[in-house]
Image: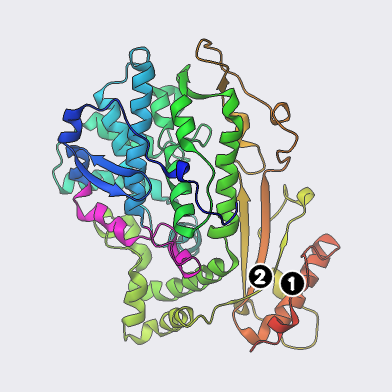
Amino acid sequence: MGASVIDELSLAPVHNFNSSFQDLRCSKHVHDNVHGNIYLDPLSLKFIDTEQFQRLRELKQLGVTHMVYPGAVHSRFEHSLGVYWLAREAVEKLRYYQGAELDIDHNDIQTVKLAGLLHDVGHGPFSHLFEREFLPQVLSGYEWSHELMSVKMVDHIVDEHHIDIDSGMIKRVKDMILSSSEFTRPKGSREKGFLYDIVANGRNGIDVDKFDYIVRDCRACGLGCNFQFQRLMETMRVIDDEICYKAKDYLTIHKLFSTRADLYRTVYMHPKVKAIELMLVDALLKANDYLEISSHIHDPSQYWKLDDSVVKTIETASDQELKESRDLILQIRRRNLYQFCNEYAVPKDKLENFKDVTAKDIVCSQKNGGVMLQEDDVAVSNVRIDLTRGRNNPLERIHFFKDYESNDKFKISDDRISHLLPTSYQDMIVRVYSKKPELVEAISEAFENFQLKTYGIKTQVHATPEKKKRRI
């Protein structure tokens, strides 16, 4: 993925030719910088015009990434509108081409639209940092996910604002939100199961959530994006209750997953972004006992009040109990970040049995003499980048069809398409940071010793630059 100008075709609006003029006249419209005009139906507006949904305006889609990519200031609010719109387009296209066969009705369309709109309403602050980095350290063993909280928030919004909506529709909306999570119901227990793969696809990972955030994030960060979701939405069809794709679109689907992986490597897991995230997690951990940040996750009526502004709350407070957190945030503001020492990619033959590297592992690898490191001096980031299915090829779970005259679906092995496609589907990168600039050299040496002890060789590409070691 290069830094070229974004392909205008990939950002063109997906026009819905099946919507009636009357439907559009009854809808409010907003102009989105990715999809063009988005039309919001009256029922969806009842959810949008609530303080719980408007909270998404205060959650940056990419967390602290804007501190490295200044344009990445878009919010979960606009992403949710985008997913709503693409969910509508997807189900409308299926109705247009296969409506009689699939028995898609107005309730189905409304349900899918609401699932797209509300799929992130329970998301935590700072992208996935809150859920994956902060909460596990304060609530060990507690099962929590933003999908589960989204489901609770949907119920809370309906009750709090007395929204008149069929209970069966709300149940299906919640099932669609959970469809790609570990809390999903068995596929066979659903009527019209293909509808549950549009917003959050637990079957094979192709969904409109990815369609929106891949294009939107590429645009915001100024990166090129040559993945064209419009082609997939135009050619997809349902066979045996499953959305399938034309065989000749194999490489387009591969590009969906490879572009996502490129975003992870280039943007989401950028070394400086991770340094800021590590510092922010430390600041939240130090503030948690006093502000009781983690307590918000138990009650939707309190949770909606939690957003990215918690940082401003900490740094403007005068309370002595928040001094350590306040100092860390001030360091971030002044760009006195945890210093990146070095990284290595875990050898391919070691991936299967890999265990996360810890600060203790690095400290215990220090040789005698010189500065004695403490675990609190070191920060380690274990970065996993894959094509959505770990070490497996995600395209192995996708069914294809030959043409529209055939009702047969089949899988395609990648060696039948191209020998240029990857044979490995996951990277594991271990990065080490020094919390104090004067310890970069000692930590870098301990990190090299750890690699020698673990793998018998230094797996990092090069030694830590001398200039970085001398920085104080």
Q: Is residue 172 visible?
A: no
Q: Quadrant of residue 370?
A: bottom right
**Residue range corresponding to the magenta coloring:** 48-74
**Up-down relation of residue 375 to residue 22 (above or below):** below
Of callouts 2 and 1, the N-terminal one: 2
In this view, the residue farthest toward the right is 456
Q: Is residue 465 visible?
A: yes
**Disc 2 target residue:** 432
User: Relative to the observer, which residue lies in front, 305 or 309?
Assistant: 309
Determine the CA span between mark 2 and mark 1: 7 Å
Residue 447 numbered tag: 1
Q: Are marks 2 and 1 in contact (CB under 8 Å)?
A: yes
Secondary structure, mark 1, is helix
* Percent position of residue 415, x then y: 73, 30
Answer left or right for 124 relative to 2. left
Residue visible at 40% across and 41% down in the picture: 12
Measured as percent of width and height from the top left, residue 45 is found at 19, 44
Q: Residue at x 48, y 31 (%)?
A: 231
- Which three-letter amino acid code belongs to the residue tagged 2? Val
Q: Is residue 355 left or right of residue 457?
A: left
Lateral position of residue 296 relative to residue 193, left or right: left
In front of the other: 40 or 20: 20
Q: Quadrant of residue 419?
A: top right
Element assignment for label 2: strand
